[in-house]
Amino acid sequence: MMAGATLPIAFTVSTAQTLTVTLKNPNCKALNDAAVCIPVPENGNYKSATVKIDGKEIPCQMDDLDNDGRKEELAFVVDIAKKGKLKAEVTFSTDEAAADRYAKRTHAQMWFKDNDKTRSYTEKQHIATDTVSERVDNMYSKMMHHGPAFENEIVAYRVYFDSKESTDLYGKRVPQLELADGLWYSSEVPSLVKERNFGDDIILVGQTISIGTLRGWDDTKDDPEYVKKQSAGKLMDPCMVMIKPFDYRQAHILAKGPVRTVVDMNVEGWEYKGRKLNLKSRYILYAGNRECQIEQYLSQADGKGEDLSDMEFVTGVMKVGIFNTDSVELAGLHYMKDGKGLCASFGKDWPDGNHKLYPQMSSAALAVSIPSNYVTRTIDRKEQILYGIHPDKGNKIAYRMAFCAPDKEGPKLTENPWTPKSWFNWCKQWSQLKPIVVEVKK
């Protein structure tokens, strides 16, 4: 190199693309924090986006949901009038955006448990992870709160990392994010409960369907006497088929906010009804929404892509408090189903078998709404309301779940106190809501 010569400067030219997006509310009801999701253009390696409505920037996030290194979806939430229409200006950029540019309204977490008994609950040094996997069913007890947990300001969910894959529920008193500090078991941190008005776990799942869990079903195993053999929900409905045996299982947090969380529960090689299946259960929770969207993706484990629409599975809700003998008037007496895909329950029970740590019963109200095209039949059992469901021709099943914590939620979370009547009315209206219509123009 000649004396005095300089090396060329390496730099990257930022590129951007702006789209006009029209949002339409097809419902005769104004929506707050309505979920919007649009595909990211494939003609550029876009790493961030800015969304403006009426010239005002609103929070958004871009997610890579198939782990191929490219972000495929842009998500945000909007307030929109009944039958209303909004125009959004969306600009995609190849520049990275600061991770903290928007305040977080959602959160997801998963931890390897610290079992050091010399450390107190608040001193534990759990190891955070976004992915955990296993080939034998032994990680459940090694995980803090037994699997991934995710929340927005209104509700929190967790999914058990075992063959039940049950969904558990955490009710809140005030709108806030709190799992990062309470780690789900807020009863262990009474000072924080008092100082920040934390919520808590509200249901005892047992061996039931819980809420929104996908399971297998086998009518040939039915036993008319099984309910008499039940003890506080500890025994399983004989027709219920857990997600086992399997070859491989994984829990994966794909997105942690600020606008939504996305969590996948993946199973490979599930042996069910003479076939080996792969199952991806995806949970999507948006800011400000009581509901959680569930997408079930099924495929043949041998990769042949066979149509699985002839296979039947089940989901639904447990009848909260059905085995509760301490409060008969509230135990399992309130539930409903419409035979088309909506089911709900409202009851009261102990949220945990440890009555020293959980000295009071909790009310819980649950609901699942399934599009009728997936529904094969209604199955009303002693401890749960189920729908038989089958995949569409693309081997997918999509539905929604929602819940409330009637004796916890304050006026900032609910306009009026929840009762069985008000909850079931809410469920009927919620089940009829249609998603925002999105029209994209370059």
Image (tube, rainbow, N blue to C red):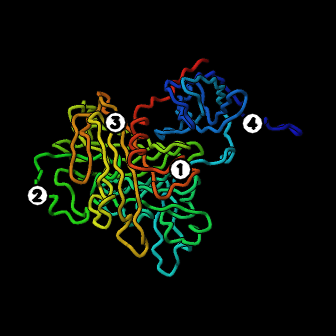
Q: From this viewpoint, which residue is outermost toward the top?
A: 441
Q: Position of residue 244 (x, y in %)?
A: 24, 53
* Mark before the other along the chain sequence, 4 or 1: 4
Q: Is residue 417 above or below residue 234?
A: above
- Amino acid beneath label 4: Ala
Q: Residues within 10 Å of mark 3 (few under 14, many from 20)?
A: many
Tell me the element at label 2. Answer: loop
Answer yes or no: is residue 236 visible.
yes
The residue nearer to you, when weighing 59 against 273, is 59
For the residues labelled 1 and 3, say whether their Cβ atoms are less than 8 Å apart: no
Q: Which residue is mark 2?
A: 225
Tell me the element at label 1. Answer: loop
* Mark before the other along the chain sequence, 4 or 3: 4
Tell me the element at label 3. Answer: loop
Q: Position of residue 327 (x, y in %)?
A: 32, 64
Q: Which residue is mark 3?
A: 370
Q: Residues within 10 Å of mark 4 (few under 14, many from 20)?
A: few
Answer yes or no: is residue 267 visible.
no
What residue is shown at x 60% (from left), y 34% (from top)? 78
Label 4 – label 2 distance at C-alpha:
75 Å
Q: Position of residue 51 (x, y in %)?
A: 65, 31
- Amino acid beneath label 2: Glu
The residue nearer to you, when weighing 206 against 343, is 343
For the residues labelled 2 and 1, say whether their Cβ atoms are less than 8 Å apart: no
* Mark before the other along the chain sequence, 1 or 3: 1
Q: 239 left or right of 14?
A: left
* Mark before the other along the chain sequence, 2 or 1: 1
For the residues labelled 4 and 2, say whether their Cβ atoms are less than 8 Å apart: no
